[in-house]
Image (spheres, rainbow, N blue to C red):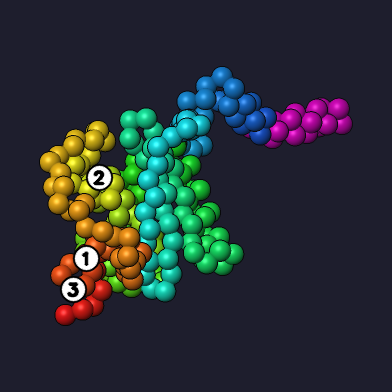
């Protein structure tokens, strides 16, 4: 009786271990032999990262509001699709500068893993936190936060179907395919001398003479004369 009892007890202990062993074997088989099934059970499918080329085109945008200013640099794939961003705040070493730099890295990795820019714009536009304020950009107006401004600007620049040429020279524009379509250029706009013109107080861009005062060719801000 003692032998039979111990045998039964031993078999019951082994039986209690079988489910755990079975689960471990199932997990290993799913991870090694059937990665798709494993991804379906334990999380989203693995994404492949598509890095940008060592040499890539980019555009840098200056912004200033709420007592802060910085620069947003967007790098492109060969087809003109944004693949990375860099955010540099003027106050180097500050907490907000470090947060924005890390945030730019997260967005860049997301774009390179296939997250659509529209999804990021929809999620991060109109987020509200300080600093906030008037931007001097007529198309954006009041920015509720830095991320609100940046992603509303990128939505206007890259998702609106029409992208203005650099420095707004002439009527040229870049279509959704990101190919430059040159338009007629009025040479008279380049006849003025801007060497002595003051910088714009709103965006820091170049100003041109307009009557007895100056007008910013970037945001339309005037020097304040009547």
In this image, 61 relative to 190: left or right?
right
Badge 3: few (under 14), some or many (20 or more) residues near its Cα, within 10 Å? few
Of circles 2 and 3, the one toward us is 3
Query: Of label 2 and label 1, which has the lower sequence position?
Result: 2
Is label 1 in contact with label 3 (beta carbons under 8 Å)? no
Q: Which residue is mark 2?
A: 165
Q: Secondary structure at mark 1?
A: strand
Q: Which residue is mark 3?
A: 212
Residue 13 in the image: above or below residue 214: above
Is label 2 in contact with label 3 (beta carbons under 8 Å)? no
- Work out which residue is located at the far top of the displayed protein and give it: 33
In this image, 188 relative to 50: left or right?
left
Residue 140 locus on image (x, y percent) = 25, 62
Residue located at (70% from left, 33% from top) = 17
Residue 18 locus on image (x, y percent) = 67, 30
Residue located at (21% from left, 78% from top) = 225
Q: Which residue is mark 1?
A: 209
Residue located at (75% from left, 34% from top) = 13
Q: How many marks?
A: 3
Badge 1: few (under 14), some or many (20 or more) residues near its Cα, within 10 Å? some
């Amino acid at each position: 009786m003692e032998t039979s009892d111990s045998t039964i007890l031993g078999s019951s202990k082994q039986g209690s271990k079988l489910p755990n062993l079975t689960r471990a074997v199932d997990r290993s088989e799913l991870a090694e032999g059937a990665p798709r099934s494993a991804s379906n059970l334990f999380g989203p499918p693995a994404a492949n990262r598509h890095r940008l080329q060592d040499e890539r085109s980019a555009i840098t945008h200056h912004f200033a509001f709420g007592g802060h200013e910085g620069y947003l640099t967007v790098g492109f794939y060969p087809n003109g699709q944004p693949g990375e961003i860099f955010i540099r705040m003027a106050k180097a070493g500050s907490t907000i500068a470090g947060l924005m730099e890390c945030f730019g890295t997260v967005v860049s990795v997301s774009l390179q893993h296939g997250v659509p820019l529209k999804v990021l714009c929809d999620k991060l536009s109109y987020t509200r936190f300080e600093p906030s304020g008037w931007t001097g950009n007529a198309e954006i107006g009041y920015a509720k936060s830095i991320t609100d401004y940046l992603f509303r600007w990128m939505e206007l620049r890259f998702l609106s179907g029409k992208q203005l040429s650099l420095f707004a020279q002439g009527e040229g524009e870049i279509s959704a395919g990101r190919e430059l379509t040159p338009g007629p250029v009025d040479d008279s706009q380049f006849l003025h001398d801007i060497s002595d013109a003051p910088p714009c107080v709103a965006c820091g861009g170049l100003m041109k003479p307009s009557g007895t005062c100056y007008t910013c060719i970037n945001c339309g801000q005037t020097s304040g004369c009547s």
